Amino acid sequence: MDKKCTTKTKPFDMKILERWFILCYIVPIYAGSLFGSLFDFIKESCEQAANEPDDTLEILSEYDFIVVGAGTAGSVIANRLTENPNWNVLLLEAGGSEKFIMDIPILANFLQLSEANWDYKTVPSDNYCLGMENRQCNFPRGKVLGGSSVLNFMIYTRGNRRDYDNWEKMGNTGWSFKDVLPYFKKVENFVVPGYDNDTKYHSQDGYVTVSYPPYRSSIGKAAVEAEMEYGSRYVDYNGATSIGVSFLQSSMKDGVRASASRSYLHPIKNRNNFHLKKSAMVSKILINPSTMLAYGVEFLLNNGKRYFVNASKEVIVCAGAINSPQLLMLSGIGPKEHLEEVGVPALNDLKVGYNLMDHIAVGGLTFLVNTTDADSGLLKPKSFKEYFPNHKGVYTLSGGCETISYHDTENPLDPNGYPNIELLYLYGSLSSTRIFRRIFGIDGDIYYKVYGPIIGGSSFMVFPMLLRPKSRGRITLKDNNYLSKPVIEPNYFSEEEDLDNIIKGLKILLNITQQPAMQSIKTELYKKSIPNCEANGFGTDDYWKCMARHFTFTIYHQCGTCRMGSEDDDDAVVDPRLRVYGVKGLRVVDASIMPVIPIGHTNAPTFMIAEKGADMIKEDWNWTSSN
Ligand SMILES: Cc1cc2nc3c(=O)[nH]c(=O)nc-3n(C[C@H](O)[C@H](O)[C@H](O)COP(=O)(O)OP(=O)(O)OC[C@H]3O[C@@H](n4cnc5c(N)ncnc54)[C@H](O)[C@@H]3O)c2cc1C
Ligand SMILES: *[C@@H]1O[C@H](CO)[C@@H](O)[C@H](O)[C@H]1NC(C)=O
Ligand SMILES: *[C@@H]1O[C@H](CO)[C@@H](O)[C@H](O)[C@H]1NC(C)=O
Ligand SMILES: *[C@@H]1O[C@H](CO)[C@@H](O)[C@H](O)[C@H]1NC(C)=O
Ligand SMILES: *[C@@H]1O[C@H](CO)[C@@H](O)[C@H](O)[C@H]1NC(C)=O
Ligand SMILES: *[C@@H]1O[C@H](CO)[C@@H](O)[C@H](O)[C@H]1NC(C)=O
C-alpha cells in the first residue's frame, strides 16, 4: 500500500489503456451476450415492486391492532390478524421496500453494506471480537420490509424437540414440542424431496417455501460425503431427530429468497383492512400510567413528521431482539434503575434487555482446495445467465452456505442426541474477496497478514458453531433518544465452558476434513497464524481458543431479550401468551421472547412463535375463522 502511494505516475499509464479497453470493448460484448438475462432481471425487479404492498395513503386515527416491525414475526402477525375482515391492522416498518436484488441468494452477505441494515456493533471487548476493528463485532439486523429475513442466509432449521420441551418445563405452558409442531407445519410449504411425504413433520399448506437450492458445488458434495465417512447419517434435521448431515434446507422458492414479506405480505396486498407504512419508526408505545393500558404508538417518518395512532385492542411489538427491548425501555418498561439513569420515567420494573443470547462460531477456518468449480467466478456471464431466467446455478447458494451437520459432543453419532455443535460449510472463505473484511468488520492489519497471501484463491470455510451457549449478554439504552443505537454487550465466552465446547466442535471438523472425500479435492487447512495467537503454537487448544476470541463470528441469532416466563419467574418480561407483564393491551411477538435459544437458526422458530402468537391473539379476542 505504501509502495503504491510513493510510486510516481509514469508518462504513459497502461492502466488507462486497459480501462478504456474494458469499457469500450469488453463491456459491450458482455452486455450484448447478457441482454436476455438483463431483461429478465429488470422484469423480475418490476414484478417484485408491483407485488409488494404499497404504503397506505391515509392513516386512520385508530386501529384494532398496531404491529410494530414488518420482519419475520410482524409479517406473520399482520397477515393472520387481517384474516378477520372486521379487524383493521396497521403495520409500521422503519425500513423501506425490499428490492429484487436482495432476493438473489448468493448476494446475502453484501446486503449488510446496504441501507437495509441497522448497522449495529457490539461494545469494544477484551474477551471476544478481538480480531475485529476496534474489538467490536458487527451486528447486522434487517431494516427493510421483511426485516432480518431479507438479510439472512435462508438456512431453515427448526431446532430440536428438546428445545421446546425445555421451554415448557421452565413454566411456559403450551410451548412443548408437541404444542409447537403444528405451528412449524403451518409455516411451511415443504418441498424437500425424500422428506416432503413425511406428514407427521411436514406440510405443503404454509406460506414459506422450504427447498434445497438447485445448485451443488463439489465442495458441498465432498462435505456431505466426508461427514458420512466420519459416521454421520444423512438426515432431515427438520424431522424427528437432528444429529447428522444434510444439504441446506433453505427458505427459498424456485431459487429466490422466500422472505417474510414475500411469503406473508405479498399475498395480502389487496386486503382493505391491512394498512402499511414503511420508513415509519415507532419512537414510543403510549401507555396510560394510571390504568397501565397500552393505547397506541407514536411514530415518525423520515421527514421528521410525527404521528400518534391509537389501538383499540392491542399494540404488538415485533421489532426484533435488539429493537423490541429498546422500544419497551423507551416507553418506560424495563429495569427501573437503568431507565432512571437515562432519564426515562419508569412505569414497570421488568428485566427487559437481559438474557441476550446468540449462536457464535470460530470464524476464519480456511481450507485450500483444488477443484475446478471452487472459484467459478460470480462475475462470469455464465453464472448470470444460469440465474436469469431459470434461477439455477451458483447464484442460488444461500449466501454461500451449502452443507450443515449437527453433532452432540457428549454422545458422538447417537442419532437421537441433542446437538451442541453445528458445522456450517460455506462455498468460499474470508479470502475469496476483500469485501468480506468490510462485511465482517475484521481489523485490516490482521486480515491482510493472515489472508493476504491467498486472496482470490480456491478455498472454503467452515463455521464450528456453539448451539447451546451458557453465556448471556444484555442490551441497554445509550440515552432516551429513540434514534440512538442501543448498547449491545453479548458477553460471549463469559462462561469458559462455551469456549471448551466450541473447540470440541472444531476438532470434529478437523477430523472430517481428513476423510477421503475431502482429501479427493485436496483439502488442506490453511495454517497461517493470527499474529496475536502465534505464541500459542498453531493448532494447539490454546491457539484455537485465542482464534475463537479473535474471530468471534455471530451467526446473527440474537434473541431472548424480552424473555417469556411464568408469573413466578422474576426474569420474565412476557407471559406464556406473550403479554407484557403489568401492562394491558401489549404483547411482544418475535425472537426476543425465546427463554432459551433453540439449537436451530432462529428464523424458523420466529415464524413458529408468530403463528402461535397470532392464534393466541385471536383466541383472546374470541375470533376463530369459522365464526
Ligand atoms: C445477516 C443475518 C443472517 C441470518 N441468517 C439466518 C439464517 O440463515 N437462518 C435463520 O434461521 N436465521 C438467520 N438469521 C436470523 C433470523 O433472520 C432472525 O432471527 C429473524 O429474522 C428474527 O425475526 P424478528 O421478527 O424477531 O426480527 P426482524 O426480522 O429483525 O424484524 C424486526 C423488524 O422491526 C423493524 N423495526 C425495528 N424497530 C422498529 C421501530 N422502532 N419502528 C418500526 N419498525 C422497527 C425492523 O426494521 C425489522 O424490519 C440471520 C439474521 C441476520 C441479520
Ligand atoms: C387516543 O386515545 C387517548 C386515550 O384514550 C385519547 O386521549 C386520544 O384522544 C385518542 N387519540 C385519537 C387520535 O383518537
Ligand atoms: C418418502 O419417500 C421416500 C422416497 O422418496 C421413502 O424413502 C420414504 O420412506 C417415504 N417416507 C414416508 C414417511 O412415507
Ligand atoms: C490441481 O489439479 C490439477 C488436475 O487434477 C493438477 O493439474 C494441478 O497441478 C493441481 N494443482 C495443485 C495446486 O495441486
Ligand atoms: C477421526 O475420528 C475417529 C473416531 O473418533 C477416529 O477413529 C479417527 O482416528 C479420527 N481420524 C483423524 C484423522 O483424526
Ligand atoms: C371471550 O369470551 C369469553 C367467554 O364467553 C368471555 O368471558 C370474554 O370476556 C370474551 N373476551 C372478549 C375480549 O370479548
Image (spheres, rainbow, N blue to C red):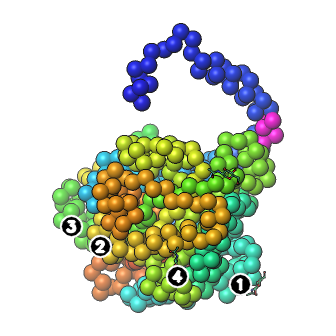
* Secondary structure of the residue carrying numbered label 2: helix
Q: Which amino acid does label 2 sit on?
A: Glu
Distance in Å between CA atoms under marks 1 and 2: 40 Å
Characterize the magenta stretch by its predominant secondary structure.
helix
Residue beneath label 3, please?
Answer: 336
**Quadrant showing the N terminus:** top left
The residue under the point 42% across, 63% down is 362
Disc 3 versus disc 1: nearer the observer: 1
List x then y, in percent, for residue 427: 60, 57
* Secondary structure of the residue carrying numbered label 4: loop
Residue stretch rendered in magenta on the structure = 33-37
Dot placed on the residue nearer the N-terminal end, 3 or 4 = 4
257 is within the stretch colored magenta: no
Residue beneath label 4, please?
Answer: 160
Distance in Å between CA atoms under marks 4 and 1: 17 Å
Are the residues at dot 3 and dot 2 in contact (C-beta closer than 8 Å)? no
CB at mark 1 closer than 8 A to ligand 3? yes
Badge 4 density bin: few <14, some 14–19, many ≥20, Cα 10 Å:
many
CB at mark 3 closer than 8 A to ligand 1? no
Residue 255 visible in the shown view: yes
Distance in Å between CA atoms under marks 3 and 2: 31 Å
Q: Which amino acid does label 3 sit on?
A: Lys
Q: What residue type is labelled 1?
A: Asp
Residue beneath label 1, please?
Answer: 198
The residue under the point 44% across, 85% down is 410
